[in-house]
Image (cartoon, rainbow, N blue to C red):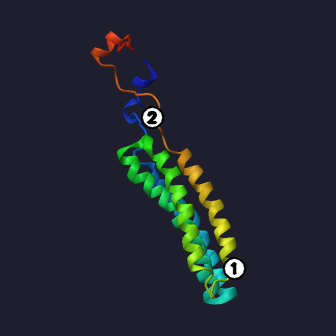
Amino acid sequence: MSPAEGPRASRLSVSGPTAAPWLNILKACLLWTGIPAAAAAAAAFLAAGAPGAASVASGWLLIALFFGISLLVGHVVGRKNPSGAIGMFAVTYAVKVVGFAVILWLVGKPAWLEGPWFFYTAIGTVVLWQTAEVIAFSRTRHLIYSDAPASPDNSAKGISGAG
């Protein structure tokens, strides 16, 4: 009796690639960064008042928007063209860098912004976001080879359907 035919075989199932990993990666990143940002906002509120808490929230929101847009684009494009998602990441990144730079240049630094709280929150969020993204992505499954059984017409191509 092969291991596949043993008593545990009825509980095992074939697993395939992760259907659309981008939203799950986004959720993980928001969780990994949102909780520490909320704690930092509470600390900033106690230390610097409402402007400190708003600065923390702004730093987190800026980074979450910057990286979240890419994951949402990856989700939308990846559903229709999974291999095109990575290319769209590159295009989206270039558009975001220019777009965010223009917006930040036009808006400038608001008078209420507490620079250190904003800066350290943004840096911490980037580090945590990238860590969460790598870990969440490493847990996705990607189909490299088709597990579909060979059809009879593949025999003419030298591909055997018999295992």
Q: Nearer the viewer, mark 1 or mark 2?
A: 1
| Nearer to us in this view, 2 or 113 | 113
The residue drawn where x is 64% and y is 69% is 122
Name above or below for residue 92 compared with residue 2.
Answer: below
Q: Give the class, few, some or many, for how many residues have Cα within 10 Å of label 1's Cα (few <14, many ≥20).
A: some
Snapshot quadrant of residue 117: bottom right
The residue drawn where x is 42% and y is 24% is 4
Residue type at numbered disc 1: Gly
Camera sees residue 36 = yes
Q: Which residue is mark 2?
A: 143
- Circle number at residue 132: none
Name above or below for residue 153 compared with residue 90.
Answer: above
- Circle number at residue 115: 1
Q: Position of residue 81 (x, y in %)?
A: 38, 43
Is 151 left or right of 2, judged from the image as shown? left
| Nearer to us in this view, 111 or 79 | 111
Residue type at numbered disc 2: Leu
**Nearer the N terminus, badge 1 or badge 2?**
1
| Nearer to us in this view, 64 or 137 | 64
Q: Secondary structure at mark 2?
A: loop
Q: Position of residue 147 (x, y in %)?
A: 39, 27
Q: Quadrant of the N terminus?
A: top left
Name above or below for residue 137 compared with residue 118.
Answer: above
Q: Position of residue 43 (x, y in %)?
A: 66, 81
